[in-house]
Amino acid sequence: MAQVVYRKNTEFAKVIAYDRHLTGYDLGGNWLPFDRSAPTDCSGCVGDECDAVFNGTAMAWTRHDMSTESWRPTSMNGRADRNNGPFGSVMVDHPDQLPANAAVLIALHHGDGSPEDSHMWCQVDNLKIETHGGNGTVLNDGVNYLDKVLDVHTIDGPNQYGANNWWYIPGPIKEDGTPLCTGPSDPNAIQGRLTDAPDTLFADVSDSQVFVDDSYTSATYPDRGQDWPYRWISIKSNDGDIEDPKFAANYAWCVKAVEDGRLEGFSVYYFWRPGTVAVNTHMAMVKAAGGPHRKMVTEVDVETDDGKNPIHDVSNQINSDVDTLATWLGNQARVLGYGNCSDIGIMWPHRPAGLLMRYAGYGHNPAKPDQVAHQYTDGTHGYGGGLPEGAPPFGNCCMNSADGLSPAQLAAVLGVGDKPPTTTPVVTTTPVVTTTPVVTPSLPPDYLQLIYAQLAGPIGPDGYGHGWPQLGTDASGANLTIVQFLAKYKPALDALLAKAPGTTAETVSLTGYVAEAPPTPQPRRRSTATPATKALAPKAATPAKKAAARKATTPAAKTTARKATPKKK
């Protein structure tokens, strides 16, 4: 089944092309998200357009090691599968066979078998896009941009330069309310409706609220001067063996909203109880509702519940649930934990590696290393600090924020992001691949917390470092921190220094060491991501037929206070 292409993604693909109009040409170069002047070549342009059509703002911004040779079919001495090419594209033998409702049309002129002797261009919806050695990226939408762009239907012949190979990405484009893009992005106007929200705010609800309806995705929240629709939600399935009576209807609405393109995804949470009754009830309810849907995430709600749950470490039991769910859903990324810091520290201090959490922190952000979102209010005491205390149709309710993650990025992090279909690898004499990997944005690191952990040891559930086992222990058996280790062994180090040749009284003590001219510390170099590995083949001269017009290269433009958190409703 072909991957659905949404209007929001095709319009994003167009806007990144408009933003890079006439930016120049660089063989083997790559477009960059925050430097619109960075040039690329023909295959880099088409690759980024295909990536954006599937992944929108969560696109990878890499070349994926692709070139024109990635599309060379077996009939032209290549290895590309005509029925499952790069990005799930499909080949036709003549441009007249290109479907009218295709999301992307792709044309290639294959030369003698090297990327430098071939060329490609594309059309996304109504926008014709080509990158060549003359002006870089040129565009033609028939209205506002009228550059001379090769048409995908042009056939190569004795009297004209054109294509001898054609592909398309199946449509139709699924409309989701996104307006059509007609020019470059404007931070004060078009940008807001072409990209996802900077942060994802969402409600989590149960039978304590009314049924969810379309007013939820019609409502908006303010973020960085613009208004954004709600595109994620969390709903309850059960508490132990007690089923939420509104689950079936809420789940059905979520599925429809995802299929309509109004939600990027949704989570279903269950309240954990000892044994397996809670997780089994959850899976049975989801299955009865027709799930699990490909855009659904399961959430394990872990709370002491005023002593009704164990007030001690039950990590093994909860981790068993996680294993069961990961197998059921096919990916641990689709399993999320929930709880306040205190309860998690008591009941679930040892969690599976890589498991992400949604922490409750009313009035403050817990900002834990494994945090993907936090519940900032229960909607009743004004903990939001200016953020929404609820959303339609529920009124005041528990609200959450995935800081720094757009809805599409949140979906990707939780393993339910959009991705192109898997394709058969292409093998040629040049390095190529044929598919875009799933884009999984990582959470931004908290460097202060990382520095603290290096000094004081891994941070425990109480928020403090507890020393490093590699450094030994003190009299009580606690692991030593770096400072404690140095203090413990300083006398021994002083004694060793005293025995070293050429030492004096001044240089014996570590605290009084005054070596003549200590070398100037040199900063450690941090590697920076580069757009892509340049094409391995040298920049050979291209045939006269196309050297001047298409492939002549140009130089590259190149909280601390913990507040009480009431039981989740």
Image (spheres, rainbow, N blue to C red):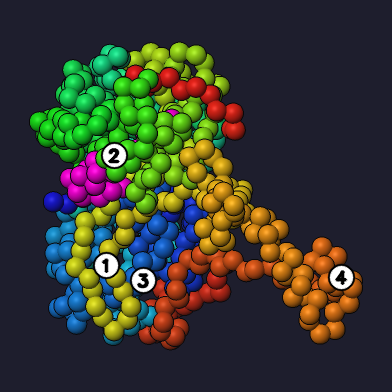
Distance in Å between CA atoms under marks 2 and 3: 41 Å
| Location of residue 227 in the rendering, given as x and y in whole percent from the top left corner | 47, 28
Q: Say which amino acid is labelled 1.
A: Thr
Distance in Å between CA atoms under marks 4 and 2: 55 Å
Q: Which residue is mark 4?
A: 514
Tell me whether the residue at label 1 lies in contact with that at label 4, contact meaning CB atoms closer than 8 angstroms: no
- Camera sees residue 535: yes
Please tell me how crowded label 4 is: few (under 14), some (14-19), or many (20+) other residues with Cα within 10 Å.
few
Q: Secondary structure at mark 4?
A: loop
Q: Is residue 254 left or right of residue 217?
A: left
Mark number for residue 65?
A: 3
| Location of residue 274 in the rendering, given as x and y in whole percent from the top left corner | 24, 31
Distance in Å between CA atoms under marks 1 and 4: 61 Å
| Nearer to us: label 1 or label 4 | 4
Mark number for residue 318?
A: 2
What secondary structure prevails in the magenta region? helix
Q: Which residues are magenta?
A: 318-340
Instruction: Looking at the image, tell me whether mark 2 or mark 3 is earlier in sequence order.
Output: 3
Distance in Å between CA atoms under marks 1 and 2: 40 Å
Vertical order, 218 against 191 (above or below): above
